Each structure stands twice: as C-alpha cells, then as structure tokens.
Image (cartoon, grey):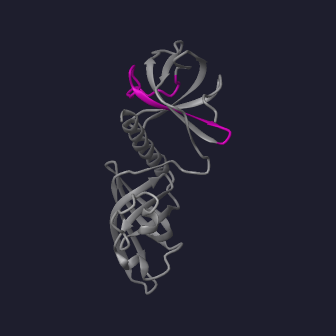
Amino acid sequence: MQAAPEIDQRVKLRADDGGEITSFVKGFTDAGIILAHPADLPVENSYYEGADLQLTWHAEGGVYYLPCRLVVVGHDGERMWEVHITGGVQRQQRRAYVRANVPGTITMRWVNKIQVACTLTANVDDLSEASVRFLTRDRSVLVEDMKDKPVRVGLEVAEEKFDLHGKVLRVARYDTVAQQILAPGHPSFSDTWAVYLLFVDHGKAADDLRRIVYKAQLLERQAISRQ
C-alpha cells in the first residue's frame, strides 16, 4: 500500500461539508504534508486552521485516502498549506464506487408486465454516485422478474431531491444480505427484500451524489476515530 502521495502529485482535499479542492504535494514534515495553495479555493469555504479533512490521491491499485487536520492556511498564491496526519491511510479499489449509509427516502416507479403503473416508497439503505440499495417488504417487487427493469427514481437525501432514470440490478432476500452484517441470533429479516438499482443517466447528479456520499463517509470515519 502506498502510505503517502509523491512530491508534485495531484491530491484532493475534502471537507466535512462535502466540498472538494485540488492541490499538489510540495514536501513532507515529521507530522504531515506540505501542499501548494489550492487554485480552486472558493471565496466561502470550510478550509480553516483546525479543520478535519480527508486527503485523497490516485495511485496504482486504487484511490487512497488519509484523514488529516489543516494546521497552516496560506491566504495567497505564495504561501503553502500544511496538514497533519490524524489517522492511517486506507485504499478504495478503483473498480468500486465510494459508498455510504446515507439516510433518505426513495420512490421507485415502474410499469409492470401487465402495463399497470406501480409505485414503491422506502428508506435508503446504501448509496453511491451510481447506485442505491433500499429495503422493502412490498411484495410487488416479486411479482415478476425485475432484473434490468427500467424505473424512475425519486431520491431525497441530505435535504436534496433527485429525479433519475435507473434500472433494477437485482432483488435479493434481505436475510442473505443480513448474514454478512448481523450478529448471530439477530431476528430474521426473511420477509424483507433488498432492491439494488443502477442510475443510467444521472449526469451532473453524479457529482452531487458523490459529494453527499463523501460527506457521510467522512463523518463515519471521524465518529469511528473518536471511539
């Protein structure tokens, strides 16, 4: 695993509000990393001395992320920034979208095999920029083979609304999913189904969803680090 980015390597700094800026590595200290002043820093931003951030970069094998704290902020193009490392480096495989448990609701609309319009509303269980998983006890998802079924997706997460086109990847009994995450002896979820959807034309919404997911993921890691 690559423990740190290289000199002059392009990196991203993500704030806990989901904002993201670009910088370049200029050096290292005993406690952290020296970065070039970000050229894309917005006038109103969450990058201040003491802010907890996530530093990410691309390298062989995937995308790496490193929790850090901003300790020196340069206010012009001449000064450098400095971040101190606050946790261990981790890797996200290239082939995987970044995912997080993001609270929200989803409404799925489709036309079934006898041309009847169907609507189903449920809670979001897992979200990425390209797909979503939700849980339901509505057996309308079992009446026919739903694989590749085109659907309309209404998504409400992080006080934002999205109207997207998608398709069903699969429908699975939740007890087969739950076996991976529930302790032995946990009550069965055999009457609950997990529905996996893929967004097919999300365009700019992908950037907005990515920001929401990164923010949720960062908050999760910060909570774990405090334990």
Residue drawn at 48 percent across, 46 percent down: 207
Residue drawn at 42 percent across, 74 percent down: 110
* Total count of labels: 0
Classify 18 as above or below 178.
above
Q: Quadrant of residue 126?
A: bottom left
Q: Position of residue 82 (x, y in %)?
A: 50, 18
Classify 118 as above or below 14.
below
Q: Position of residue 58 (x, y in %)?
A: 62, 37
Q: Quadrant of residue 132?
A: bottom left
Front in this rendered view, residue 214 or 155: 214
Does the magenta portion include 50?
Answer: yes
In the image, which residues are magenta? Answer: 38-61
Q: Is residue 201 left or right of residue 227?
A: right
Classify 132 as above or below 35.
below
Residue drawn at 47 percent across, 52 percent down: 128
Q: Is residue 167 left or right of residue 43?
A: right
Quadrant of the rendering where the N terminus is positioned: top right
